[in-house]
Structure formats: structure tokens, C-alpha cells
């Protein structure tokens, strides 16, 4: 499909900076419409790559695609190195990898993934919780290792219905998780920046009190200075020995060291984790725990969401280059 974005003064397709792990559908779709300057494919150090992009004549790039937790953080130094940049399109919902205040000061517009991933992440969160409670992955390993005929019945898991689930962050994803778990017969509580008048769930102004009244904590909030390690030792203690924690947000929302200690010492019952503080590194202690379910930051990824994200990413870029409003603006 031909690009609807305006061509540059030189008649070439507009240049786009690309900071994302290689993915054939993304690359092919972008290259049909834009001149892609791919940081990871270049093999260059970031300062060298940015300097070359800034010197590109006659039309240095005005837009960039970046991913959360990826190869580059967009901060003042990044923006200084590329003064032509006026648009950032993040392929994540979270924008903790972008200095929004600095972008606003410089007039750089920012778009994110919007709600493309929301349903898939909510499904994954529920799947992790069911897996932890019913020991699905642990039971599967038990069968594969040939232990069933040797050791007899696998230990019983626990039911989901009736659980008090505390959700940290009742935004789009948190709300979808709540609706799904409500259908399973769970009792929903929540903590958020402010109380939501549109829901009947019990609101807790602080996470410690939410944990003390919950059997399960689901972390679904954005990562920022206020929410880094929002789940700490005190919150884990409040959750208690029968408590389970699910994290589909960002690894640094939880104090990972304290979580490992709480699991090792039996101070909480289990965890389902899709994200980690120092990805792709995962604490070695978690790997041998049967009461912990681990996935590789994959809650957002389905074939359908990947296709939708690609379309939305291109739509945001073409909207910016055509002087139209972004489809999923974070900073207008």
C-alpha cells in the first residue's frame, strides 16, 4: 500500500528512526512507507547512530519508533543529539522510557500503543493467576517428568472463586482484569490515583491496606517515581502467607529482592510474573519454585495484537507527517 505521508523535499520517503528488536512484519511494513534508520541493525553505539541521523541530508528524521525497556531511553541527551525530532511513537502502553516533561518542553509529540494490548494483557493476568492457584504448569512438569506413576496424585491446588483480588491501578488494563475476575466470582478491591465513581469496587487509598484485605494482588499500574517498588516488604507482609501476587505491569513496580525473600521464606504463597526488574535476567531462585509461574514479558503479544499494533504505529506516523492529530496521543 502506498504511503499517505507527505514525501520530503528531496522526494524521498520520510526518514524514521527505529529503536526496536527486529521483527519482520514491523520492518517490512515500515520500509514500504518510510526510509527506516534502524539502530539495532546498525550495530553502532547510540551517540554515533544519533549523530549520523542528525547529519542526514537534506532531511534528518522528524519521527522515531521506540519500545519500552528497549535499547534507548529518550531523555534530554537523546533529544539534544537529534534536534530535528518532533514525534515519538512508543510501541508500549507505558512511557517510563520517555522523559515526557522534556518532550513537552521541546514540543515533541508522543503516542503510545493505546488499548491495542489491553485485552490480551488482562487475559494473561487471569491465566497467570489460575496457573498459580491450580498449579497448572507445576502439574504439567510433574506429568512430563514421569512422576505420576511413581508418586501418585499431584498435590491439590486452590479455587479461584471467592478470592479477594486487589488491583493496583484500575486503568484500562486493570478494569478489564477486574471484569474478567468478577465473572469468576472474585471480590474486587482496588487502589488507584483517585477513586473511580463509575465502579462499585471497594477503594483503598494506599497499597498496604489493599494488600491486608486481599488474597491476591495484581499489579497493573504504570511505572513512575511514585510506583517504583510500590510493592515492598511491608506490602508483602500485609498480603500474608496465603497471598499471591501477579505482575503484568513493569518489573520495577515490585521490589524484586524482597519478593524473592518472601517466597523463599514462605511469607507469601506464590507469584505469577510476566515482568522483571532487569530483563531479560530473572533471579535464579525463582526458576526452581513450583509456586511461581514465569513468562518472558509476553502478556502483550498475540498474533492479533502484533498486527493491530503495526497498523496503529504506521497510522500514528502518517498522521504526524501529514499534520493530523495522533491516533493515540500521550502528549498532543
Image (cartoon, helix red, strand yellow):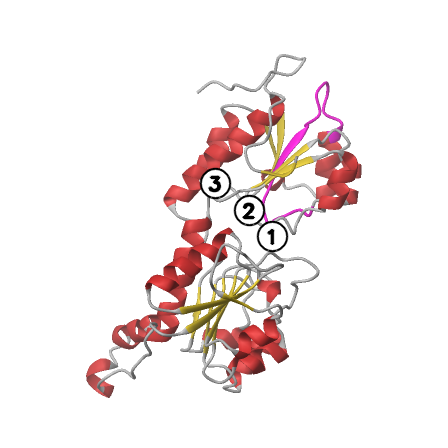
Which numbered marker is on residue 92?
2
Residue 281 in magenta stretch: no
In the displayed structure, 193 sits above or below 149; it is above
Q: Position of residue 111 (x, y in %)?
A: 60, 38
- At horizontal 25% and vertical 75% (from top left) the residue drawn is 143
Residue 70 in magenta stretch: yes
Q: Earlier in the sequence, mark 3 or mark 2?
A: 3
Q: Position of residue 132 (x, y in %)?
A: 39, 72
* Residue that badge 1 annotates: 69
Residue range of the region highlighted in magenta in the rendering: 54-73
- At horizontal 70% and vertical 21% (from top left) the residue drawn is 59
Residue 126 seen in this snapshot = yes
* Residue that badge 3 annotates: 23
Q: Position of residue 188 (x, y in %)?
A: 45, 67
**Label 2 CA crowd tier, 10 Å (few <14, some 14–19, many 20+):** many
Main SS of residues in magenta: loop
Q: Earlier in the sequence, mark 2 or mark 1?
A: 1
Quarter holding the C terminus is top right
- At horizontal 55% and vertical 73% (from top left) the residue drawn is 210
Dot 1 falls on a residue whose secondary structure is loop
Select label 2 or label 1 by which is in front.
Answer: 2
Label pair 2/1, CB-CB below 8 angstroms: yes
In the displayed structure, 206 sits above or below 242; it is above
Amino acid at each position: 500500500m502506498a504511503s499517505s505521508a507527505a514525501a520530503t523535499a528531496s522526494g524521498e520517503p520520510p526518514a524514521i528512526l527505529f529503536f526496536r528488536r527486529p521483527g519482520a512484519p514491523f520492518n517490512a511494513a515500515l520500509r514500504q512507507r518510510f526510509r527506516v534508520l534502524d539502530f539495532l541493525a546498525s550495530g553502532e553505539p547510540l551517540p554515533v547512530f544519533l549523530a549520523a541521523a542528525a547529519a542526514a541530508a537534506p532531511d534528518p528524521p522528524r519521527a522515531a519508533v521506540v519500545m519500552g525497556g528497549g535499547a534507548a531511553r529518550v531523555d534530554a541527551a537523546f533529544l539534544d543529539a537529534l534536534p530535528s525530532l518532533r514525534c515519538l511513537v512508543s510501541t508500549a502502553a507505558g512511557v517510563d522510557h520517555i522523559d515526557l516533561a522534556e518532550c513537552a518542553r521541546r514540543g515533541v509529540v508522543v503516542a503510545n500503543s493505546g488499548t491495542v494490548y489491553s485485552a490480551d494483557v488482562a487475559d494473561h493476568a487471569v491465566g497467570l493467576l489460575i496457573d498459580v492457584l491450580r498449579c497448572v504448569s507445576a502439574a504439567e512438569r510433574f506429568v512430563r517428568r514421569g512422576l505420576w506413576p511413581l508418586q501418585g496424585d499431584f498435590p491439590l491446588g486452590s479455587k479461584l472463586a471467592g478470592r479477594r483480588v486487589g488491583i493496583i491501578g484500575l486503568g484500562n488494563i486493570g478494569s478489564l482484569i477486574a471484569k474478567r475476575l468478577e465473572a469468576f466470582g472474585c471480590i474486587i478491591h482496588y487502589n488507584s490515583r483517585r477513586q473511580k465513581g463509575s465502579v462499585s469496587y471497594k477503594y483503598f487509598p494506599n497499597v498496604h491496606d489493599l494488600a491486608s484485605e486481599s488474597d491476591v494482588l495484581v499489579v497493573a499500574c504504570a511505572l513512575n517515581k511514585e510506583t517504583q517498588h510500590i510493592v515492598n516488604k511491608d506490602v508483602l507482609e500485609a498480603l500474608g502467607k496465603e497471598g499471591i501476587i501477579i505482575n503484568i505491569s513493569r518489573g520495577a513496580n515490585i521490589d524484586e529482592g524482597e519478593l524473592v525473600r518472601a517466597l523463599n521464606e514462605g511469607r507469601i504463597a506464590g507469584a505469577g510474573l510476566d515482568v522483571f526488574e532487569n530483563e531479560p535476567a530473572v533471579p535464579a531462585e525463582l526458576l526452581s519454585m513450583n509456586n511461581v509461574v514465569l513468562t518472558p514479558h509476553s502478556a502483550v503479544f498475540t498474533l492479533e495484537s502484533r498486527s493491530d499494533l503495526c497498523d496503529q504505529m504506521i497510522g500514528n506516523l502518517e498522521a504526524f507527517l501529514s499534520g493530523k492529530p495522533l491516533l493515540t496521543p500521550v502528549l498532543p
